[in-house]
Image: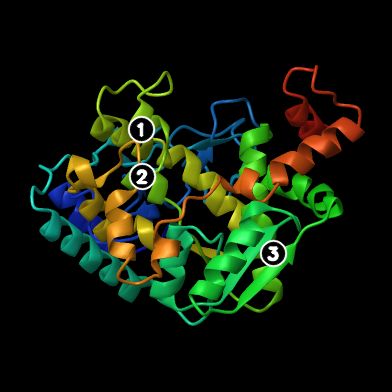
Amino acid sequence: MTLRGTDPATVRTALDDRDPLPGTAGFAGVVDDQLVRDVLGRVPLFVEGESDSVADRGRAPGQSRRWAFDPTDLSSPELFPAGSVAAGTDDRRPDRVWELPDPTPEADHETAIGTLSKALETATASLKTDDAAVAFSGGVDSALVAELLDAPLYVVGFPDSHDVDAARTAAAAMDRDLTVVELEPADLERAVPAVARAIGRTNAMDVQIALGLYLVADRVAADGFDRLAVGQGADELFGGYEKVVRLDHRVEAETVRGAVRESIATLPAQLPRDVCAITAAGVDPVAPLLHDAVVDAALRLPDDLLADERTRKKGLRAVATDYLPQSVAERDKKAVQYGSLIARELDRLARQAGYKRRMDDHVTKYVESLLE
């Protein structure tokens, strides 16, 4: 397969029209001898790096540069830029052809919410499948995905974790069954090397995040599902981070809208980690909240439907109240690495292995030691 996520005709039209949101859930690959990757980088695409790799040494002039969807297939993988096209797979300087739109916000709240609700229905109709399970943490993002897709719910975490408790409470409120994947330290020891290799990263934060996705995907695959539905993108698109309200040192923007766009701009670097972690476990990801229709609707939300000091993801929660119990639609959640207690237990494993907190980046050093 040389193109993932859509058909070549859709990409050709998007190129002709310079349309960054042509109605897909992302795409990447080769079309007409051109490497392409969608504007948000929802499908990972890697090219062989500039290093003197075995694969590149002696490559004849004009010979195509190696590329892959999986970074482990390359000697020195580099992410192909999102929103870009390389005119021939030997071109080392991709052209940026798609930019994220910056539409005028919809002034009327009812219209904005209605547009977002229809967009979610469009995404669901496009992506709904009988072979998917949902990575469910009990928060509004995964709960909305679960309700829209009507798929089985799975939560991963250590027995006393926030995510397991929240998922149980939310599933009960939604009158849904829930499969709890309770972790033990040995599960992390087994998974860390596989995850680090799959995502091509060893830093503690990326590995902690990817571990949760890999471990729930691993169980879903073992139970016979082919796909894992996730709520990825909600925090970035709808103003789910504290920093977009505080406007502190973590953002350059001076407005909530500007800070939200900064968050969206981080997706092309984040999503390959998540996708590669899930696919390494043997299933494909499904991300309804990252469908073009939803992205477009999110970009059109007025400022006061994004976030304020009291409530984040206000627009998404407003839609979610039509699908979910209010207690679930309004619930805040912790980041997966903390809510599952994976970060805590990985830190503990690192210290037990002799990598003490007084060492710089001790968890990363521990992860690297497992790959030696």
Horizontal side of 303 relative to 171 (left or right) equals left
Identity, as a three-letter code, of the amino acid under mark 3: Asp
Identity, as a three-letter code, of the amino acid under mark 1: Val
- Name the residue at 37% across, 40% down: 82
Q: Are marks 2 and 3 in contact (CB under 8 Å)?
A: no
Which sits earlier in the primary sequence, circle 1 or circle 2?
Answer: 1
Identity, as a three-letter code, of the amino acid under mark 2: Arg
Considering the numbered disc 2 on the image, is that residue within a helix, a strand or a loop? loop
> For mark 2, does the 10 Å Cα neighbourhood hold few (<14), some (14 to 19), or many (20 or more) residues?
many
> For mark 3, does the 10 Å Cα neighbourhood hold few (<14), some (14 to 19), or many (20 or more) residues?
many
Residue where numbered disc 3 is placed: 218
Disc assigned to residue 312: 2
How far apart marks 2 and 3 lie (CA) works out to: 31 Å
Nearer the observer, 155 or 324: 324
Horizontal side of 309 relative to 176 (left or right) equals left
Q: Position of residue 266 (x, y in %)?
A: 41, 36
- Name the residue at 59% across, 48% down: 336
Quarter assignment of residue 155: bottom right
The nearer-to-camera label among 1 and 3 is 1
For residue 228, say whether it is visible: yes
Residue where numbered disc 1 is placed: 244
Q: Are marks 1 and 2 in contact (CB under 8 Å)?
A: yes
